[in-house]
Amino acid sequence: MKIKEIFAPSDMTEGKPWEKIVVFTIPMLLGNIAQQLYNTVDSIVVGKYVGDNALAAVGSASPILNLLMVLFVGISVGAGVMVSQYYGAKDREELSHTIGNCITLTAVASIIIMIAGTLCARPLLELLKTPDSIIDWCTSYLVILMLGSSGIAYYNILCGVLRGLGDSISALVYLLIATVINIVLDVAFVAGFHMGVAGVALATVIAQITSAVMCMIKLKKMSNIFDLKPRYLKPSAGHSINIIRLGLPSGLTQAIFSMAMVVVQSLTNSFGEIVIAANVIIMRVDGFAMMPNFSFGTALTTYAGQNVGAKRYDRVEQGAKQGTLLAVGVSTVITGLIVLFGRHLMAIFTNTGELVTLSADMMKILAVGYIAMAVTQSLSGVMRGAGDTMTPMWISLITTVVIRVPLAYGISWLTRSAELPNGRYECIWISLLASWLLGALITAICYRAGRWKKKGIRMKMDS
């Protein structure tokens, strides 16, 4: 196979479904590993070179960061769905308008986040009762990331476009390059220049800007598939509305999840620095454990989108079944590894024995939930790719707002005692496990109902 063929977009409307999904998922999985390394290396570097409080600061800032980035999530998902369906339908004109409008919408969203995020960072941290010992570090970390949000936004959204075209290899290569830059700068800024948490934030911004520039260069070279001319960058009401219509539910899903995380973070903060730090470590390991699920979910979104665009609904159902079984199998193996080697994973982040033990014990509570999430992410990916982004949003709303948050606070309240005035800290992870298990059940029922089959974009050729 020639180099050009490796980096070429993939037509997923032909060939064996499972093979197409696996070939697309492997680079996605490697890319997600590299993506997770951004946050993980940040945590390892500050935990080892600065201390456990710095580790807690980076973790406490993460829910707010995710909440402020929901605009980008919405644009990215909407773009990916439209790009995959128009590419599957071989509609060059609509594909060009969609990609051009994505670039313009990202610029607008970046300005909004840059201003709002910078102004709201500290007030939100104070609202969450972030401990005084780490609030200054949290604030500097967030402000730097918000000021550099355009690089983070363009990388994620342009990667979404590339994946919608079936090109997961280019996104992987650019991300690997950025990850190396991030790791080198992390060590240099924190260990060398003693910049603390501000150093890891600056390293992340520089690395993300670099990867965004590489994505843009790649897209400009794909003139055989679509046109990237000034007239396509001009905002089009129809295309912009479609991107937002398809992406808004996913953006709201991320917002709901992030708000739930913010509310639960407030509960977590009440248990003190060691539980905060343990939660940071668990979420970093969780990021790796969840990666196959997210990778299969994204692959199935592209797969479903292209086949819906080509009106191959029979292939969509075949791919959904085969892709979900693959995701469950991989997740089962990962769950076993977490149970067996949990303590060794936690020890990477800290030298504090108590923190390692606490993190490993709590991670075992979550372990089986990753298998459930394989089902949720795979089938939600199919529904999104078909254009039904509302159903996954409602499922997320139910599992986070109706199940997780009340359950976390309920267990905390019911387990209060003289020795534990805030209740048992296990409530944080028990509530998360419950939401994952119920989410998988609800998702499977909604997929079987088949509402997603009626949600494909109305192509210009059909009107």
Image (cartoon, helix red, strand yellow):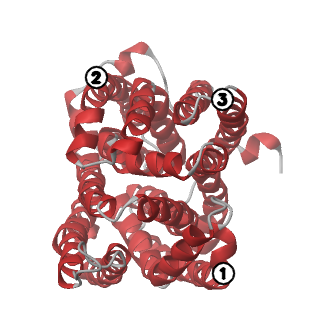
The image position of residue 370, as x and y in percent, is 48, 77
According to the image, label 1 marks what residue?
337
In the image, what residue occupies the spot 28% across and 77% down?
420
| Mark drawn on residue 189 | 3
From the viewer's perspective, is the residue at label 2 or at label 3 nearer? 3
Residue occupying the far top of the picture: 230
Q: Quadrant of residue 441?
A: bottom left
Relative to residue 247, is residue 230 depicted above or below? above
Query: How far is disc 2 from disc 3 in space, using C-alphas?
Result: 25 Å
CB of mark 1 within 8 Å of CB of mark 3? no
| Nearer to the camera, 158 or 397 | 397
Mark 3, Cα crowd under 10 Å, few <14 / some 14-19 / many 20+, is some
According to the image, label 2 marks what residue?
115
| Nearer to the camera, 154 or 314 | 154
Q: Quadrant of residue 105?
A: top left
Q: Is residue 233 visible?
A: yes
